Amino acid sequence: MSVSATGARRPLQSRRKQNPFLKRASSSPFSNHPRRKPGQAEPSLKRARTESSDDHDGEQLRSVRIVTNIPPKNIEQDVLSLMRHAQEQMFNAIPEQAAGMNSVRIAEVLNYRKALPPIISTAHVHALSTSSTDTDREIARLIQSGKLRKIEVLGRGKGGAPLGEGLVLVEEWEKMLKESGLDVAVQEKYLKVMRQHPASATVPASDFADAEVSELVSLGFMTSTSALASKTEVLSRPGAFSLGTSASVATAGSSAPAGSLEAIGGRGAIHARGGGGGGLPTSSTTKSRSTGTLTFSLPGTGAYLRLLTEAKTHIIQLLSKYSPKFKEASREMLRERWNGNILSSNAASMAKRARGEFTGILPGKTKKWKTFNGLDFQWLLEECLGSGQVECFDTGSVGLGVRAS
């Protein structure tokens, strides 16, 4: 404050009014803008990046009612019709144009599909059925009549859990047997034993000769935990367990003494390659063939199990990535992610591809085709629903919702 002629102090504001040169400098035109550290992005840009992210952290989907089955349209509800429908819908057809796969890759996909066994899990049939009780009763009748056979689908790997029970049409089982190149006499004996035990997954090993057991196991039509403990000749021939090309067996054969157990991979060679055996015989595990048992199986079951396990794991990962908090998505959104976010097969998309305007990812470059050989999304959803790995619900607005269990 200043002192006036009378000795009183005048405030600074009055002095500024009298002398314009004492006015405070005007503020910068950018003074009202929020301060940011160097390198910090604009809030609008940050928000745009968040909205374009794959993660969906919005509100949880509304659940009007739980959906326990997805019955197909225009398909009879008997078990045989549902199984044939599931087999026909397991894979998508290879695109005729712009598939993103050369002829060699297309041949690999077709051969892979052909080599898979015609197994349909019981859980899948229940997911397509409108009445689980009627389905179970019909399955029991078909098994007793010899038209259907049940096979136990076990998990692989350390700590592998059972995947449930599978169903196979007996006529398709017999077709695979005839196309396997097995001796006709062994085929007839095998079918005779199957008819004698229509509802049993195992049979006594004494029903077959040693040579017959070796041939059946090597081709994948039988597995054993005890009867083949003394049949080391299976290790030297490629078959269901691919032991003939095992790297461990080849390495052991070049470094271990000839005639020793180490020369053929050690005591756990069969078990290490995914076989059902518990290793070569020891003093505590050796059993006579008369007390052993054989389990019915089909060639290619290992590839079928791997496909199912990896596909289920991937679809759960898609749900977790899209909605980390709720692990859910609408069926159409999940289908789009499973297909690799490629253009649909409608008329407009096909016209763009024909004109050369398509710049997206070709189907053959997506995980659906590179890893899963074109496995159909709806088929996988039914499999996951029946096995209890996902829960489906009606949203009332965006169709069917899918949530990880």
Image (cartoon, rainbow, N blue to C red):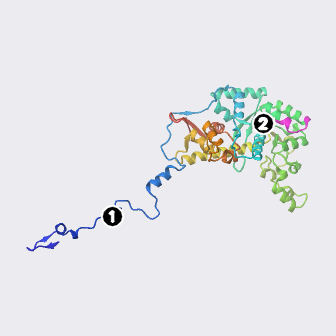
**Vertical placement of residue 199 versus 287, above or below:** above
Residue 348, position in %: x, y?
A: 60, 38
**In 3D space, how far apart are the residues under numbered discs 2 and 1 (Cα atoms)?**
86 Å
Q: Secondary structure at mark 1?
A: loop
Q: Residues within 10 Å of mark 2 (few under 14, many from 20)?
A: some
Q: How would you classify the magenta stretch by its main secondary structure?
A: helix
* Quadrant showing the C terminus: top right
How many numbered circles does the render carry? 2
Residue 91, located in which quarter of the rendered image? top right
* Amino acid of disc 2: Ala
Residue 176 in view, yes or no: yes
* Residue 35 location, quadrant: bottom left
Q: Height in image: 385 above or below 38?
A: above
Q: Residue furthest front?
A: 355
Specify the amino acid type for callout 1: Ser
Q: Residue furthest left?
A: 6
The x and y percentages for residue 253 are: 87, 59
User: Is 126 left, or right, of 60 in this rendering?
Assistant: right
When asked about the image quadrant of residue 20, the answer is bottom left
Q: Residue at x 71, y 33 (%)?
A: 88
The question of residue 56 being in magenta is answered with no
Side of 181 where 363 appears, left or right: left
Instruction: Check the picture and name the quadrant holding the N terminus.
Output: bottom left
Name the residue tied to disc 1.
Answer: 28
Q: Secondary structure at mark 2?
A: loop
Nearer to the camera, 201 or 381: 381
User: Is 132 in front, or is 319?
Assistant: 319
Residue 9 located left or right of residue 183: left
Mark 2 touching mark 1, by CB under 8 A?
A: no
Find residue 263 and report its horizontal and vertical position in percent. 87, 58
Magenta span covers which residues? Answer: 176-185
> Which residue is disc 2 drawn over?
201
